[in-house]
Amino acid sequence: MAITYAYEALPVAEWFRRNREIAGFQNPARAMYQTVRELVENSFDATEPYGILPNITVSIRPVDEAKGWYSIYVEDNGVGIPGQEIPNVFGRVFYSSKYKIKQHRGVFGLGLKMVVLYAQSTTNRPLLVRSAAVRSDKIYEYRIMIDTTKNEPIIVDMKEYNNKYKWHGTAVKVVIEGNWLNSKKRIEEYLRRTAIISPYSEIYFKGPDMEMVLKRRTIKMPTPPKEGLPHPKSVDVDTVKQMILESKTATLAEFLAKNFDGVGEGLARSFLEWAALDPNRSVGSLTQDEIVLLVEKMKAYEGWRRPRADWLSPAGQELLEVGAKSILGAEAVFAVTRKPSSYSGYPFIVEAAIAWGGQIAPVDKPILLRYANKIPLLYDEGADVARKVVDEFHWDSYKVKFPAPVAVIIHVCSTKIPYASAGKEAIAEIQEIEEEMKLALRDAARKLRIYLSRKEKEMEMLNRYTSLAKYVDEIARDMSIVTGLDREALANSLYKLIENKLGLTAEELAKHVLSMSSSIKEEAEAAP
Amino acid sequence: MGERARFLKQLEEWGAELAKSALSLREPVMEIPARTLGNTVWDERARMLKLGPEKIRRRFLDVKESRRFMQTVLMLSLIVEAMRADVFPTIRDLYYNGKHTIVFKDPLGRVHRENTWDEQAESNGVIEDIEVATNILREEMGVSADVKGKVVGPIVVRSQGYELDASKFGETALSLPVNVDALEIIKVEASYVLVIEKDAIFQRLVREKFWSQENAVLITAKGMPDRATRRFVKRLNEEYKLPVYVLTDGDPYGIYIYSVYKSGSIKLSYESERLATPNAKFLGVAPLDIERYKIPDQFVIKATDRDVKRAQELLKYPWFQNDVWRKELEYFLKSKKKVEIEALSAHGLKYLHDYIKDKIKNNKFID
Ligand SMILES: Nc1ncnc2c1ncn2[C@@H]1O[C@H](COP(=O)(O)OP(=O)(O)O)[C@@H](O)[C@H]1O
Ligand SMILES: [Mg+2]
């Protein structure tokens, strides 16, 4: 049949061509940015969840300037990929180790393949990968391409080396058609923002005309996410069918209790009774329509427990503050990690940080740095609910008058980020998430307000000192002319008079004002 | 000890008091009689403004006062230095001598720059403060102002030994010196003194020989009168019993200038006794003269908000509390019309002469 043939023959290459845009490979500049992103995010996924402090090197070099060909190289010190897995990981679409329910940067098993396919379709050069798993005796090196009709890896070349120094990690190099000039800013910004939310990483970046070192600021890492089961509200019909295939003989009650988060036999039975389904039916015997009904009921039931958030890995208040302070050069940062919440059966956590002053230039509305599962979102800011929340926020109630030197960080982590569009660069207007963003921002802004009013007072004190002390020399000189008394002694007395009046010395005052950033911040933190 | 030396010593002692209090860590405070409207009292018997009993305490440690404190001490040092060197600076000299930029680095390392004073009004103000605080007049400190006064008419004076006849200056005029008290008046044979607000009108009347026809002494101070001119007018009135008439533009500012000649000013009320001429009469142009002398519309100017405000203030002054003045000022506030002296020429160039004569002969001036 023609249709069946067409379906089967819809080769990966064709699929790629159709979906290039969605995956972020629509033009050479964007593709270059996206390639760096995919590789760097894989590197984070291979280090952070395993408690390894990430060391990541990114290097971009021109290969053929006339054609706009560049090589992109990313190396990490992660857990590596077992030798026999490498071809599949790089050569088979939708092949991923990350299908379990937990927070990752990558989720679809698509990233690497898009990179390979893009390289293939522009320069036709194979991808080079060298990797060693932890404690592996060997380092494996492959040159891989994808057979686009069969969705299979083609191994162009394979080598093995002795892993004398027990190195582990992965290094990938691809040659693609890119546009350095038009992607430079975004790539730099992407890495900078990555460093803000993961200050425990060390990133070295070398571009054709620049070099950037984002040093590790702390060795504290967020607790790695646990793996878990999906919440009954969060699954779709296809997933349930897949699950049924793996436990055909189980009864409905057993099936629910075994496969879903927070569901025991008791809760399963209450649900089934509510849904008017037989708890002893074997799931293998359910018809198509019955499965659809089951999923609908699961979504509608209000008796489930709240989804657990152990699968989430927020950055945490401390790391956000360290990152924002060092990378943005802020004078002070106030961060908040909200308690877990959920939408449609997916747990999520919102974090917000407000960075103030220092190297942040005054702006008419706050600079916004958005993150989803620790991935910086750089495009489509206008479509993001975070932008809306920040713009509608009543800044004036928190002593912020624009233009003001303020930047806001909003991080949403979830087992499923609700993106506003296929571009995956903006978070959709989900009411529960919007509400949490507002609350997170409010909590952080309260700390900022305490800080600003303390600072106001300190500055007032300093200004009072200055408005008196600036005349001391002049007055001492003039008094000395009129009276013949010692000028220095007069000046000292006048300064002393000012200090007595204000109740502290000039040095104390300067120390106060300078150290305000830290001391007042602590007090602001301690306040409820 | 000469007079000047005594004044110098007094100033030095005032400064020493402040300095010693600083050295013993007591806040230096200047006590200065307040030169404010609130502290100006109307002396009904003397018919002039006098300084009231109120004093301000200018404190070094008061953020609002510290700048003025600095300026006062700076001015004191400038005056003391000038007196020691036996030189006679003008208030403008003192302004320039004292003007410089204070550069201050605060504890955060921020650099602040500020001029000791920006305008002469500031340095003039502290001179007046020192005068009232120490009870020594500027003239006694040897500090002078630019003198604007000019005189023409049947009067002979002696200055530094030279006899000067003010009737022999042709189209020019005799300029008044800084210290008019040092001017010896040898002879005056005038029937009255006409004080003219505007220099242009003064020059016209000189050129037209108005003074010789009328046998009058003409004086102008080119607008708001300085101390020397006021002092000279007072002397002519009180020592030589000459009637004094003041001719100004027909607007509230002109009336205010008259009031300064007659009763003194708020700012310098401590000097009224030396400067005010309570017998001075207002010749015109009065607001109602616009109607009385039928001044054509094209010469009438619409009053500004500032004119109106000034007229409202004048109405409150005790020495304008009589029916004649109230009628004039209320007419002004109602009509909002003002005129310049020149408007009288609408009826011919000589009309100004007739106007003045008419006012004086027929007692049409206002007291
Ligand atoms: N740098 C790396 N280190 C270790 N494993 C990697 C690395 N890059 C990719 N992988 C493995 O390859 C799989 C496929 O990667 P990818 O195509 O980017 O999909 P995804 O990241 O969505 O899972 C990952 O799930 C991971 O198991
Ligand atoms: Mg990936």
Image: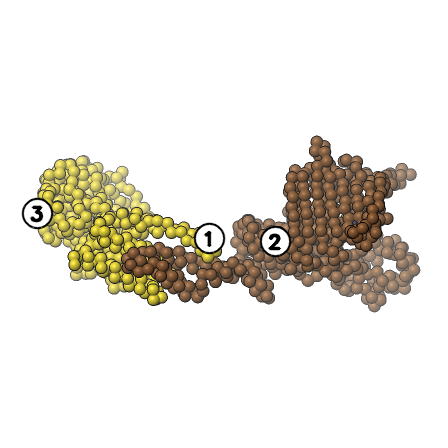
Chain colours: A brown, B yellow
Q: Alpha-carbon distance for marks 2 and 3?
A: 88 Å
Discs 1, 3: same chain: yes
Give the camera-side residue of A265 and A330: A330
Task: Give coordinates of residue A283: x percent, y percent.
Answer: 89, 59
Q: Amino acid at mark 1?
A: Arg
Badge 1 is on which residue? B110
Residues behind callouts 2 and 3 on a single chain? no
Q: Nearer the viewer, residue A513 or B272?
A: A513
Which residue is drawn at the image coordinates 18% and 53% (left, top)?
B275
Q: Residue at x 24, y 59 (%)?
A: B11
* Quarter containing the C terminus of chain A: bottom right
Element class at badge 2: helix
**What mark, if any, has residue B186 been given in the picture?**
3
Secondary structure of the residue carrying tag 1 is: loop
Which residue ends up furthest to the front in the rendered image?
A164
Q: Which mark is residue A326?
A: 2
In the picture provided, is A223 more to the left or to the right than A133? left
Q: Quadrant of the N terminus of chain A?
A: top right
Marks 1/3: CA distance? 64 Å
Q: Is residue A518 visible?
A: yes
Q: Quick check: can you spot residue A434?
A: no
Q: Residues within 10 Å of mark 2 (few under 14, many from 20)?
A: some
Question: In the structure shown, which secondary structural element does the residue marked by tag 3 occupy?
Answer: strand
Residue A134 percent across, percent down from the top left:
80, 54
Q: Quadrant of residue B303?
A: top left
* Residue found at x 27% / y 47%: B92
The amino acid beneath tag 2 is Ser
Instruction: Name which of mark 1 and mark 3 comes first in the sequence.
Output: 1
